[in-house]
Image (cartoon, rainbow, N blue to C red):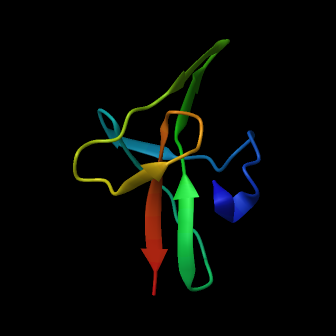
Amino acid sequence: GSFNNWNKEGIPLTEQSENTFTTQLSLEMGAYEYKVLRVRGDSEEWLEFSNEVYTVSDGFDNENAMILVE
């Protein structure tokens, strides 16, 4: 996401339940965009966001999730 300069190696997430993931970050105040890439062996899959997640256009006909840190 925008908080790690879109580094594809990303930030490891812990799967809490099917399609629910968590991690802990220390971020400055601001708005951050992100996507979630599931990697299993040689397989990669961009996960879709639920309707409960605020999204914005990524400029390539797809969406990024956005989180606001206050």
Instruction: Name the image quarter holding residue 42.
Output: top right
Please name the residue shown 22% across and 46% down the image: 51
Which sits in the foreground, 5 or 12?
5
Which sits in the foreground, 67 or 21?
67
Instruction: Name the image quarter holding residue 20.
Output: top left
**Horizontal arrangement in the rendering, residue 11 relative to residue 19 (left or right):** right
Which sits in the foreground, 50 or 57?
57
Please name the residue shown 76% across and 57% down the image: 5
7 vs 45: above or below = below
Q: Give the x, y percent position of residue 17.
A: 29, 38
50 vs 29: above or below = above
Instruction: Name the image quarter holding residue 32.
Output: bottom right
5 vs 26: above or below = above
Q: Give the x, y percent position of residue 27.
A: 61, 77
**Horizontal arrangement in the rendering, residue 4 relative to residue 1 (left or right):** right
1 vs 48: above or below = below
Q: Give the x, y percent position of residue 70.
A: 45, 87
Which sits in the foreground, 56 or 35?
56
Q: Give the x, y percent position of residue 52.
A: 23, 53
**Horizontal arrangement in the rendering, residue 38 relative to residue 5 (left or right):** left
Please name the residue shown 75% across and 40% down the image: 9
Number of numbered tags placed on the structure image: 0
Query: In this view, which residue lies farthest toward the left?
Result: 51
